[in-house]
Amino acid sequence: MKDDDFSCQMLAVNTALRLTVVLLSLVQTSALQASGPNIVLILADDLGFSDSAPYGSEIQTPSLSALAETGIRFTNFHIAASCAPSRAMLLTGVDSHRNGVPNIPEAIPPEQGQLANYRGTLGHNVVTVATLLQDAGYHTYMAGKWHLGKTPDLLPSRRGFERTVAMADTGADNWEQKPYLPIYEKANWFADGEETDLPEDFYSSRFLIDKTIEFIGSNRGDGQPFFAYVPFQAVHTPVQAPQAFIDRYMGVYDEGWEALRQQRRARAVEMGIIPRDSAMVTMETTGDWHSLTPGQKRYQAKRMAVYAAMVEAMDYHIGRLIDHLRTTGQYDNTVFIFTSDNGSEASGSANPDTAVSRFLIGLQGYTTEYASLGLKGSFNSIGPSFASAAAAPLAFYKFYAGEGGMRVPLIVSGEPLSVGHPQSSAFSYVTDIAPTILELAGVSAAPRYYGGRQREPMTGHSLLALIRGEAERVYTEDEAVGYELAGNAALFQGDYKIVLNRGPVGDSLWHLYDIVRDPGETVDLSERMPARLQRMLALYQDYVTENGVAPVPVGYSQQQQVALNGMRDRLGRPILLVLLTLLVLLLIYLVGRNMRR
């Protein structure tokens, strides 16, 4: 044999041996990394701080209560005040101004839309927790609202999820495949990356759990753990629920929103969720219940009854998933994480049962009739007054940087956790969820270069030390966490928060609060602690500079921008665009006037 032939053969053998070693190493690493627990991440949509029983609600949520009783309840957890930024940070652990989703895409003005970090869709400079878990040997499933992009490269099937059924918009009908706003031509649902049609017997909460159970069952018994992400549509508008659940809450809200707000505060104090002496503000957008006619009170009480029914229906279907995991022997090795994408939603007319409201809702093929409220074909929301009650005992609600918009429930539960304390009042933030999941799974965060791309590093902290009772805080007293969305801004440091809320509900001024002792944000400490205020303002400016936070244009309104962007995207014909835009702006004006009343 010639020397050259021999050398070639030896080179081939050596190469094969090296490849074998590498492959065996990868298999072993994957097997080791994939030995963690199953993880179920459940995300409610627009659920207020006190909308579940573990947080002082009258709404029956036995599934969430059981998880809280065997796990840990966080009472100082914060998230973005709008859905898409929260979802992007939840799945990546990266600030919304760095991951491409500083606002929902429907609300980004042209001046900001020209910036690379203001696309409103999840950038390819970040890695989702699903991708990291999938690469480590986990099965990854997603069923629910996505809202992080709907082009093929942005759908969840291309962002780390093995099996998916996803609704790509801000919201959609819960009874049929129908858009809930005129900015959408259709309700955009996808299954495993392809457009799909919903079944005839569709109800969103039931359907999403059905699909989750189906996905989990498809790989049962192969020895690999799973990560299931279940972002519900509940309780985003249109607020809809089965009649059997609605019937349970008829009469419950006949005393009105202020009575409900006081009742929830009292229960929160009794449960130790807030300090005994903490106060509440009354929002200017909260109406006078006693000035309503008996017919108006009846209608408003049913709006809230449908909302409560939608919450309980969601909880019921969560219970179905838990029961399935018990029946199939997977429960004891599963960790559950439950939270909401922002605080309660105050949009919608304070009085939708007017001729103008009925006409405008009718253009979308909906009715607001009392008898069918919450059922198929009905459009329902709770309006600003009951939204304040849903956020009780906090101030503000969705879109705003007040605690009612940003502080939401967080329950972490499961046999693999070894929970140290049943409750934590330590500050925690949405970017903490992804690193917590990775530590649970024994999987490392993505390095600076991953999958052939440069990636943004995670900025959140794992909460496992808090969960196990090994620490009282994961953020030091000096660490600052900045936040901005549509011009509303905040910065957290230690027990303190500075916050600016724009109009029409806010005053566009900075305020300083101790949100541990005063979660209702009732006592502004700016004059008592001017040095702290200035330090935190300087830290906020650092956050703006470091994260490319762009100012909103003069006169910017999130609701108006949604209308303008939506009409522009759906239409192209200038005259029709102008007419429809004027119609939508008229609706916004009427709604705003009702809210101010």
Image: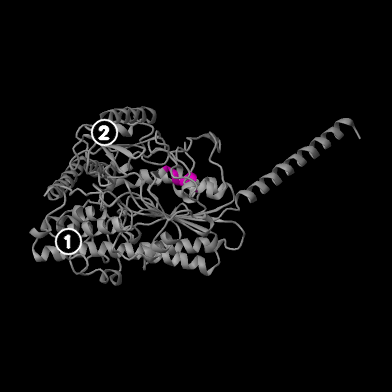
Label number found at residue 552:
2
Residue 299 magenta = no
**Residue 159 seen:** no
Residue ID at (8%, 58%): 291
- Where is mark 1, residue-wise? 256
Query: Which one is in front, 261 or 166?
Result: 261
Q: Which label belongs to residue 179? A: none
Relative to residue 528, is residue 148 drawn left or right?
A: right
- Is 141 displayed left or right of 560 in the figure? right
Q: State the CA–CA distance, disc 2 to disc 1.
A: 36 Å
Percent across and percent down for residue 312 are 33, 65
Nearer to the camera, 186 or 56: 56
The location of residue 485, given as percent across then percent down, is 30, 39
Asked if the stretch drawn in magenta spans residue 432, the answer is: yes
- Residue ranking furthest to the right: 1
Q: Left of 1 or right of it: where is 512?
A: left
Going by the numbered disc 1, the residue's amino acid type is Gly
- Relative vertical location of residue 74 with respect to residue 69 in this rendering, above or below: above
SS at circle 2? loop
Residue at disc 1, secondary structure? loop
User: Residue 350, how many percent across, how many down?
Assistant: 16, 54
Magenta residues, start to end: 431-436
Amino acid type for the residue under numbered disc 2: Val
Q: Residues within 10 Å of mark 2 (few under 14, many from 20)?
A: some
